[in-house]
Amino acid sequence: MTSVQNLRLRLSGNSVLLVLFALIIGFSSCDAFRKAQTDDKRAEDRKELDEVQGEGRYNPETGEYEPSTSINSEVDTVNWTVDPDEAPPIGSDATPVDESVDPVTGDPLDEGSGEKLSKYRVAVLLPFFTNRFTDGDNIDNASLSAINFYGGMKIAFEELSRQGLDIEATIHDTKGSESTTATLMASPEVNNAHLIIGPFRKNNIRLAAEKAKALRTPFVSPISASSGVTKDNPYFIQVSPYLQTHCQAITRHAKERYRTDQIVLVARNKKAEISRFDYFQQENKKIEGSDDAKPFQEYIITGEEMNFDDIDVGPYLNDNDTTVFIVPSFSNKNFIYGLLLQIYNTKGNSEVVIYGLPQWMGFEPPSYDYYELLNLHVSSANYVDEDMEEVKNFQRKYFEKYGTIPNDKAYSGYDVTMYFGKMLDKYGTKFQEKIDAEQAAYLNSTFEFIREVPLAAALQEDFSKTNLYENKHVYILKFDDYMFKKAE
């Protein structure tokens, strides 16, 4: 384990936004969060903190982190790393695990291998990109997501320690690299861990998930919501709901409030967008309880995508009724802006409601008035209610420790660490087998995990096999008073 070096990281603008933590240099850093016996405000914690840039969001189209605007600082967004012209990936060629033998020695395992321990080892793999630092005065924007996530994790580790949970956490920098991730996954710190959290990038998650399956170690994917990274993997835990889950949540919310004939699915003439219609139509059949249920209307916009004259929503509007447009698109914000403008200019006295995907919260439209006047709703994996006392307490702790208010990744880091720390404490090293019975809500996340069972096993009512565990909780937010709030 290498020692931690303090670096002062300055923002190139006019203000310092974060005072955070000692950046990990080298392969790993070790934090031992043992049962607290003294005051939690230790001087050495404060010495670790330094200045970095503020909140940003990852754009899968550009591969860069972009600044967030204050208007969406209350919410988080999910990034699906899919080719915008291809259908979302589904499935993989992973090999099922033989849970009766040790993956290394081949020896039979004891029934009690999921025991509760006096101390747990947790390996955290995040893309800090320490290799991009040229000196102590600058930090690469790509590092910010991991830095903020770990800032929240560190507070959670300390709280769990005060509650009596003994954790030894090793923090590793993947540098966003598959080769580095592979090296880390072969290291003793990761091989001997009872829980692995991270990394962020799809290819690194796929690599780490398969290694964790071989190690029989619970593996938590905390941020990325890319499907198809693993299969037949009873150790894989997906925190951010998949795209299909968002579509299902939007369908349920809309169906509870509007008739089927009021709802219109809208997409460009793109394979990926049109393929998403099936998620909504299938969920509608499930809600109606019949394969013969009346389907939603579908409007596919043809012609040149940037020629807004090709967008004609008039036939779907009714002065005496409300029209609900569901738009499962996120890869072209100019198309979304053009669609909103055409709906606004055409609707007249008609009432409209629009549902979009979480990426929309990271966009900055020409005018937020369109969001307000068109009753915009979006799905989201996360939501922070700043009136909650628990949120206020966390904000105070975070500010005292780092000199700034937390951003969305900081909340997520805290929530993930608290939930899975408590699961280890309650159930031991095979906690994932109980995860679908342990719902919990924290600062910006609600955890409602569902065990995904292979179709063939489900048809035979054999629920002993597991593909993975996915968090199914999705918030529906409405843009109201120029901010996103939890919809009623």
Image: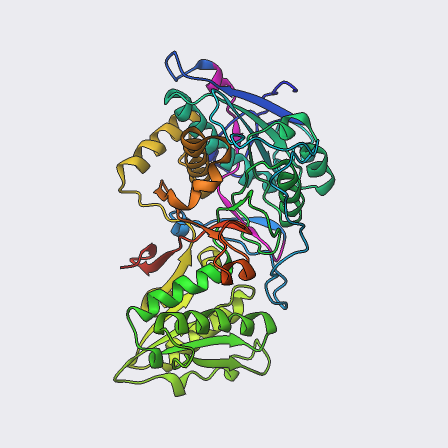
Q: Position of residue 44 (x, y in %)?
A: 49, 15
Name which quarter of the figure residue 305 lies in: bottom right
Q: Position of residue 162 (x, y in %)?
A: 38, 20
Residue sitting nearer the eye, 146 or 263 = 263
In the rendered image, the quadrant that contains the N terminus is: top right
Residue sitting nearer the eye, 110 or 240 = 110
For the view shown, which residue lies furthest in the top direction? 38
Residue at (31% x, 77% y) in the render: 259
Q: Is residue 338 above or below residue 420?
A: below
How many numbered dots are placed on residues in this image? 0
Q: Is 214 included in the stretch rendered in magenta? A: no
Name which quarter of the figure residue 273 lies in: bottom right
Residue at (45% x, 64% y) in the render: 247
Residue sitting nearer the eye, 145 or 98 = 98
Q: Is 56 included in the stretch rendered in magenta? A: yes
Residue at (65% x, 30% y) in the render: 191
**Can residue 357 be seen by looking at this rendering?**
no
Q: Position of residue 453 (x, y in %)?
A: 51, 55
Name which quarter of the figure residue 386 lies in: top left
User: Which residue range is magenta in the image?
Assistant: 44-62
Residue at (63% x, 62% y) in the render: 83
In the rendered image, the quadrant that contains the C terminus is: bottom left
Q: Position of residue 28 (x, y in %)?
A: 64, 26
Q: Is residue 376 left or right of residue 468?
A: left
Residue sitting nearer the eye, 361 or 213 = 213
For the view shown, which residue lies furthest in the bottom direction? 315
**Can residue 284 be seen by looking at this rendering?**
yes
Q: Is residue 396 above or below residue 57?
A: above
